[in-house]
Amino acid sequence: MWGRSNIGKTVEELTDHLRLVDHVRALQDGQKEIAEAIRAVNQRLTSIEAEFRVLKAETQRDALREVQHAVTAVQGSMHDELTRMATRLAVLEQALRREAVRQQAQPAASRPPGAPPRPDGAR
């Protein structure tokens, strides 16, 4: 029948088996904790990625606004300069017309009647 040594061996095997079962349960619990930690890290990374996307979009929007302001300032400056140039040109054209009218009136008055104009174009 069952001797003490057989009972001792059976108890040892049973104890080893129970330890193994406990270790397997501990491993399973550890795996569950690791899986939950990985899931939490994954959610945080997804959240961080979304925050970066928002930050990137905001940064691009701000940069576009700055560029738009710069372009608007340059356009305004160019418009002002073109307006000044157009005004100067109009003033110069009027001055040239007045000078041409004055010069046309002056040679006719200083030239004796019947004197032909000079061939070299001088007055």
Image (cartoon, grey):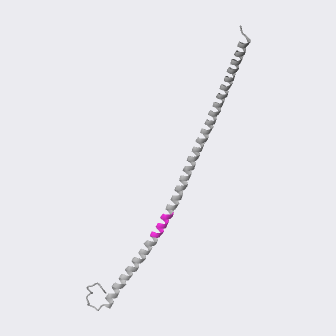
4 relative position to 95: left or right = right
Name the foreground residue: 28 vs 74.
28
For the point 55% across and 55% down, which residue is it?
62
Name the foreground residue: 92 vs 27.
27
Q: Is residue 75 above or below residue 98?
A: above
For the point 38% across and 79% down, which residue is it?
96
Q: Is residue 36 above or below residue 109?
A: above
108 relative position to 39: left or right = left
Expressed as whole percent of the image width and height from the top left, the position of residue 69 reads: 52, 60
Expressed as whole percent of the image width and height from the top left, the position of residue 57 reads: 54, 50
Name the foreground residue: 51 vs 95.
51
Q: Residue furthest bottom?
A: 112
Is 81 included in the stretch rendered in magenta? yes
18 relative position to 104: left or right = right
Majority secondary structure in the magenta region? helix
The quarter of the rendered structure image containing the C terminus is bottom left
71 relative position to 104: left or right = right
Is 119 included in the stretch rendered in magenta? no
For the point 59% across and 44% down, which residue is it?
48
Name the foreground residue: 6 vs 71.
6
Part of the protein shown in magenta? 73-82
Expressed as whole percent of the image width and height from the top left, the position of residue 50 reads: 57, 44
